Amino acid sequence: MYKYSEQDHQLLLERVSQFRGQVDRRLKGELSEEEFKHQRLRNGLYLQLHAYMLRVAIPYGLLSSEQMRTLAHIARKYDKGYGHFSTRQNIQYNWPKLEDVPDILDDLAKVEMHAIQTSGNCIRNTTSDPLAGVARDEIEDPRPYCELIRQWSTFHPEFNFLPRKFKIAVSGATHDRAAVAVHDIGLRLVKSETSEETGFEVYVGGGLGRTPMLGKIIRKYLPKQDMLTYLEAILRVYNMLGRRDNIYKARIKILVHETGEERFRELVETEWEKIKAGGLFLRDEDFNWVKGFFNDPVYESLPDSDADFENLMLSNAEFARWVDKNIELHKQSGYRIVYLSLKTAHQPPGDVTADQMDAIADLADKYSLGHIRTTHRQNLVLSDVPLKDLPALWEELKALDLATPNYNHVTDIISCPGLDYCALATARSIPISQAITARFDDYDFINDLGDVSINISGCINACGHHHVANIGILGVNKKGTEVYQLTLGGSAREDAAIGKIIGPAFEADEIVDAVGKVLAVYLESREEPEETFLMTYRRLGQAPFKERLYG
Amino acid sequence: MDNYIKDRKVDSDEWMPFTGLEDGDSLPTGDIYVPLEEWLNARETLLTRNGRLGVALRNTDDPEIIKDDLERLDLVVLEFPKMADGRAFTQARLLRERYGYKGEIRATGDVLYDQLFYMQRCGVNGFELRDDQNASHSLKAFDEMTVTYQPASDEELPLWRRPK
């Protein structure tokens, strides 16, 4: 994990003190709410329906157990005893008081955390693969690149007042677990075709919201040495030419779309030619320095089998289900990656209580070298668990209600906070996700359905990523009633696709049935159990689903 | 007192904006700055004056247009029509870093306490603060942050490449 230098610490302290001053000026009335808004947003502080919401950055989803304990402490001391992990690997607190926020930031700074640029029209927290550094399908560890992007983008003086927010994701593996195609910039590490070098495939202009679009590949191969100069060139073109007349047309996806992919590429490349030899060019020593923070932990040399583990697999069906659904192979023999499901019938998706956070931190210390990751599907990961410890870990997770065997299955639902919290929402989303979970919460059914995703957004801004779910649900308000549109066929992975609306919206009490019908059509139509929902949908198209829903 | 900061000191503003040039005889004396269009239309006439000369860019103008004129200009005025509109940050960096401009780059419009740090890093050294801002109080905004990660007009190298 990246360790802060003295200067990194200094920067955080200065930032907290600066923000304390801004809050003070606001409370004294020296700063108008409108002007304070720009400042507080750059520090992750939103004004929501009932209270302020503070979004804390978790750079590329990496947490230490110590940091997790601080997150628990904040939930307990300044909030109502819980936090919400977001689709961008961050955590949100829904009830902080404005005057407490500087103290919260002080507490965060002690463990090298902050809320810098977690909102506002600037470069947001860079996200990545939650399995970075441990995945078997990894081409190269993306975290050192993420850290360089974090430093480059933090308080970038030129790009702090962009036309709109700006999100960057980096993936280093064959499978895309970072949803690079739906970010303003997505970087996918690839091997050069002509040498042993690695570089990036560069996607620009992806995003969801009102106008969902997949990113365009504007460069098939960018040498890694040029990563930051190229990002700077893209951002510069965007800062000068991105639309500022209409907030809904201000994202870079609209600029790419309106300028045309070809012309946009030309603009970027022309700018890049002029700066590519500048100070942001990355030398070998720069990579060596940053990679030094992400060396492999000292793994024990363990056998890749364990008698107790295998016995329990045979004797305990519940354990076997959990292993089948929530465990992934680790690049290191004898170790496994464990998903902690934050999707139960008892808590809103992504919510974790302070007690759970403390317990997770203890489990991370006990079983996973103190490492925790957050995922864009709003779950957590213990990344380095010895195979032989899985039975004991499972018992402890079960007691914490964190062992639901549903990772990447139908009840592993992404949901935005919706009308229960959010000032922008037009419909509730948490109750819908809970109703769906309650309806389909049967292991055999979940298992039979296999790999399928349901995402729910409570308004057109699409924070719940409904466009890229196999089954997406969008809540809208129609003449005072909350109704739900169904979108089918989306994907946020390497086969990224924007789903299509299937037909007229459903009332709140009809939407769960509608999802049930869609799933039934799939189960009846698949050619073999290995054919996933998405494969069946792509083979058959909308027709049979439409017929069942509206026929 | 003008609400004006130059090179991190509260200063008085010597410059007058000027527009509407009709012929050489009506040229004002003193230090004036003119809109870009006027400069492009009447460059030679304007250069016959003795006083110093500046050009005001709109934030949609590409500073490249005046790159060959920069040696003759003592002031380039940039606009921040509202706080959220950050185009002039890029213009300032291009003027300083790409075109090597050494004269005053002045921020006008919504020039507020909390942006001064960023403006300064991009090469702005003249600040025409908005009326409600307090110039002497604002001086401390330049030093609220001392750690900078990325190169800009004030630093050629990123933090990780600077001598420790």
Image (cartoon, coloured by chain):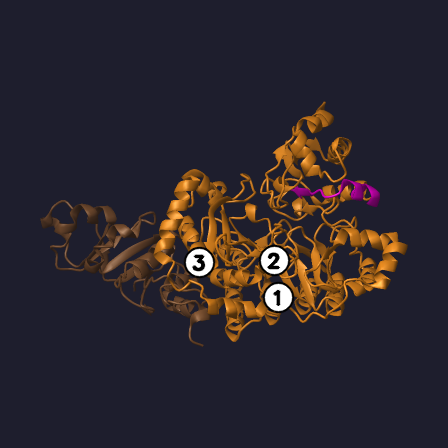
Chain colours: A orange, B brown
Residue A2 in view here:
no
The residue sitting at the top extreme is A551
User: Mark 3 is on which residue type?
Assistant: Asp
Percent of width and height locating residue A525: 75, 31
- Residue A357, label in figure: none
Whichever of callouts 2 and 1 sits on the residue coming sooner in the sequence is 2
**Callout 3 secondary element:** helix
Q: Chain of mark 2?
A: A
Q: Are marks 2 and 1 in contact (CB under 8 Å)?
A: yes
Q: How many marks?
A: 3
Is A534 positioned to the left or the right of A355 in the image?
left
Q: Which mark is residue A226?
A: 3
Q: Earlier in the sequence, mark 3 or mark 2?
A: 2
Q: Is residue A179 left or right of residue A153?
A: right
Are circles 1 and 3 on residues that touch, CB within 8 Å? no
Q: Which residue is mark 1?
A: A104
Which quadrant of the figure contains the C terminus of chain A?
top right
Q: CA distance from mark 3 to mark 2?
A: 34 Å
On screen, residue B120 versus residue A541, left or right, reads left
Q: Which residues are magenta?
A: A443-458
The answer to whether residue B31 shows anywhere in this view is yes
Residue A429 locus on image (x, y percent): 69, 43
Asked whether A335 falls inside the magenta stretch, the response is no
- Depth check, front residue: B153 or B81: B153
- The disc, 1 or 3, on the residue closer to the chain's N-terminal end is 1
For marks 3 and 2, give the one nearer the viewer. 3
